[in-house]
Image: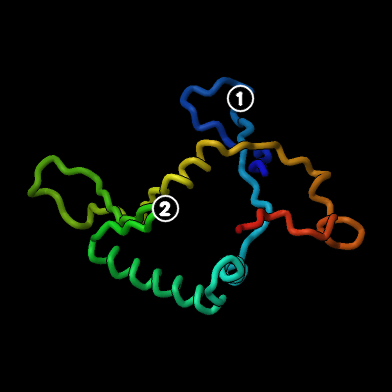
Amino acid sequence: MPLQFHLVLRKNLSKNVEAGKEKLHYAQTRATGTCTFEELCSIVADSSTASSGDVKVVIDRLIKFLLLFLARGEVVQCGELGTFQLVQTSSGSVTAEEFSSSMLYRARLRFRPGPKLRELILTAKSERFKLEESKPSEGGGSGSGEDDRPVIE
């Protein structure tokens, strides 16, 4: 299923903006739903020999140790999922003596996706969201009553 987007009108931040072009239309991706943590664990459990509780425990432990290794300054490789790293930059100073830790910016989490996620990014298709498609059917459901998420086998 392609990514859906809609257009939003935003201020043009370019220098020397021509009259009449102060605002431009930009594409903004639109989420089609949310997969909760419980749903994710259930789907993973259904496609493996682990129970949903087992999956939750494993993900909980994964997060605990990700935090530990990232806090130690290590790069954490998670196989085909990708790599996590805590990074921090700063403003510059003319000399090393003038530099202080107050010049550091807030740390950020850098995620580098694995090969399958990179392929998904490169091949993602988009379509413009049409307002009439978002109207719920009379029964209050999403239409066919079936889940349109891909089946993981």
**Along the line of sight, the residue nearer the viewer: 140 or 2:** 2
> Height in image: 60 above or below 123?
below
| Up-down relation of residue 61 to residue 131 (above or below) | below
Kindly indicate whether the residue at mark 1 contacts the one at mark 2 (C-beta within 8 angstroms): no
Q: Secondary structure at mark 2?
A: loop
Residue 40 lies, in percent from the top left, at 58, 66
Instruction: Name the amino acid type tagged 1.
Output: Lys
Dot 2 surroundings within 10 Å: few (below 14), some, or many (20 or more)?
A: few
Task: Left or right? Give the position of 73 relative to 38.
Answer: left
Residue 41 placement, left or right of 131: left
Q: Locate residue 135, reporting x and y percent.
A: 83, 51
Is 36 located above or below residue 16 in the figure? below
Q: Which mark is residue 71?
A: none
Packing grade of label 1 (10 A; few <14, some 14-19, many >=20) is few
Q: Quadrant of the N terminus?
A: top right
Seen in the picture, residue 71 relative to 53 is either above or below; the reply is above
Q: Amino acid at mark 2?
A: Glu
Q: Secondary structure at mark 1?
A: loop
Furthest residue to the right? 138
Q: Which residue is mark 2?
A: 80
| Front-most of residues 53 and 99 | 53
Question: Which residue does the numbered mark 1 point to in the structure image?
Answer: 21
Which part of the image, by quadrant, shows the C terminus?
Answer: bottom right
Residue beneath the point at 33% across and 70% down:
65
Query: How far apart are the two marked residues, 2 and 1, measured between alpha carbons?
Result: 44 Å
